[in-house]
Every structure is written in structure tokens, then in C-alpha cells.
Amino acid sequence: MPFPYEPFDLAGLQTYPLKSRASKVRVEAFARPYAPGRGLAALLDGLPALLAGADFRAVVQALVEARRSDGGIVWGLGAHVIKTGLGPVIVDLMERGFVSAIAMNGATVIHDFEVALVGATSEDVDEALGPGRFGMADETGRLLNGALNDGVAAGLGLGQAVGRFLAAREPQYARHSVLAQAARLGIPVTVHVAIGTDIIHMHPQASGAALGEGSLRDFRYFASNVARLERGVYLNCGSAVVLPEVFLKAVALARNRGVTFAGLTTVNLDFMRLYRPQTNVVTRPVAGGGRGYTLVGHHELMIPLLAAAVIEESAA
């Protein structure tokens, strides 16, 4: 039976005073405009205490507290972090004690290795693919595969293998390399590969046995590092699939051994929200305890800003 055209009766509608309402936004949380000469600390302090502004402050506090309490800080780095020139920022954080361990995917290692070797990386895929030159840089395929093969044969993981190679060779641009400086500082680096995803797998020197064995060793090292983050911080920066999946499995192993992660803080930092980082980093690992945050923005802006905020806050 159809309803009639009948306007809703607004007579007797109940209202309440505006001031009595519980509001989510108050002027006390508003941003404060920046004045010339006030400096970085004032800029950061003037961010609004709302949404991403509040989350950014919370992540800064978590990192500072993790360092003060030896809770541990593990960084998961996708290749884009290196390609956007952020290696020196990560190295500086390593030297300041804000990095306990690093996890990388295979592409991250390639870009960092090329930076260390020649001070340049990231070929033009569109230009190189047509004539069959994509991924065919000799030193990248030959030397990096050689370093991995030799290191794994010596009982090392992939991260240790590349770190050992760079430490022994001391290439011209090693100071810009996260892997080289991690080896210098004794910070563990683990590498987690998917066979066929990286250009070095296209070269004849690539060994599936070495890649598989080394990556499995690194997964177990990584799981051990994650298990130490009961009161620490894990940051996933720029890995959409591999590192979020590896992190979730490491969390599962640690929980199986009784680690509750009640004080864990997880952060996904990327220029868009994606399913696996949001689910496997921000949500699932901290369910029932801990805190998860998503910071959306370009790495080349957000990571230097986050690093500066952490340095300022730890010096206060």
C-alpha cells in the first residue's frame, strides 16, 4: 500500500542548548599560525590537536618513549623511501638511537646498493623496457647477486650479506647507504624477497637457493626483532604488500610464544591508504592492546618532518 504525500510534523521537536552538547572539536585544539623566526618546535607545537595532527603527535611521543625505555623501534622500508633520497635521514635516526632494526623488501636493497656504489639509482622503466635494457645494469646484477650468494653460503641472511659486502668494499657513496651505515653501527637489517619481483632475479648469477635460504633466515631474525617490541614501535614506510604480510606472520609467531604486545605502537606511513598495511600493520597486531596509526603523506615530506619532530621532542 503506497504512503501518502504527507510532510513530517515538526511541532514539539525537542532541542537543547548548544553549549551542553558534547562536541568533538573545540577551539583549544585549533592550530596556531606560524610567526617568522619561531622555529621548528613552535611549528610542530602549533599543529592542530585533531585527526592527523593528534596522530602525528602521538607517534612522535611513542618513538621518543620507546627510545627512552629501550622498547625498540623497527623500521620497515619500501623502495620508495630510498628512491626519494631519505637514506641520510634514516641514517641520522640510526645514529641518534631511534632505529633498533630495519626490514627491507628486495627492491629497497637494490636501490640502496646502487646508491652506495655509484651515487645514483632508479632507472627510467618506460624508456628502458622497449629496447630490452630494463634491469640490465651489469654491476647491480653481478655484484649484488654475488654478495648475496657468498653471504648466504657463509651462513648469513640477505641483509647481513649485503652489509658485509659494502663494509669490505667501502664504495664512494657508502655514507648515503642505509645498508652500509647499518653495518657500521651494528644495526640488524633483514631482507624479505618475493622471487621474480626484483631486477637482480633476471640475471644469470641469481640463485633461488640463496635467495630463499637467506630470506628465510632473515624472516626468523625479523620475528625475533618483532618479539622484542612489547613496548616498542613498528613503522611500515612504503611497502604495500610484502612487509605488511611478513610483519603479521612475525606477530603471529611472537603471540604463539606468549608475547601480548599490549604496549606496541604500529604506524603505516604512505601517500595513500591500502588494505594490507591498514589491516596487517595498523589494525590486527594491536587488537586487544596497543595503538595503531596511519599517517598519510608523501615520504619525502613526512619522514623528514617526523624525524625533525622526534629530534626536537627528545631534546626538550
Image (tube, helix red, strand yellow):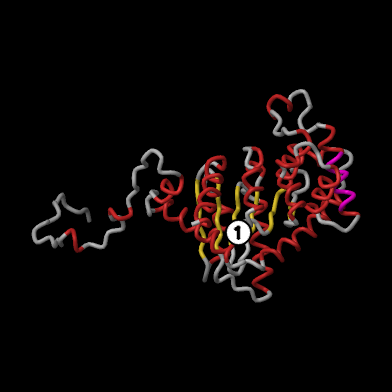
- Left or right placement of residue 139 versus residue 278 in this view: right
Q: Amino acid at mark 1?
A: Tyr
Give the residue displayed 78% in from the left and 52% down from the top. Answer: 159
Q: Position of residue 312 (x, y in %)?
A: 51, 52
Give the residue displayed 88% in from the left and 49% down from the top. Answer: 149
The residues colored magenta run 143-151
Q: Position of residue 10 (x, y in %)?
A: 12, 56
Q: Residue furthest bottom?
A: 258
Magenta residue check for 145: yes
Q: Residue furthest left?
A: 11
Quarter containing the N terminus? bottom left
Give the residue displayed 82% in from the left and 54% down from the top. Answer: 212
Callout 1: SS: strand
In-front residue for pair 123/204? 123
- Left or right placement of residue 216 versus residue 204 in this view: left
- Left or right placement of residue 274 versus residue 246 in this view: left
Quadrant in which residue 233 is drawn: bottom right
Q: Position of residue 216 (x, y in %)?
A: 79, 58
118 w.r.t. 61: above or below? above
In-front residue for pair 294/303? 303
Quadrant in which residue 152 is drawn: bottom right
Q: Which residue is mark 1?
A: 234
In-front residue for pair 65/268? 65
Q: Position of residue 138 (x, y in %)?
A: 84, 32
User: Mark 1 Cα within 10 Å, few/some/many (few <14, many 20+)?
Assistant: many
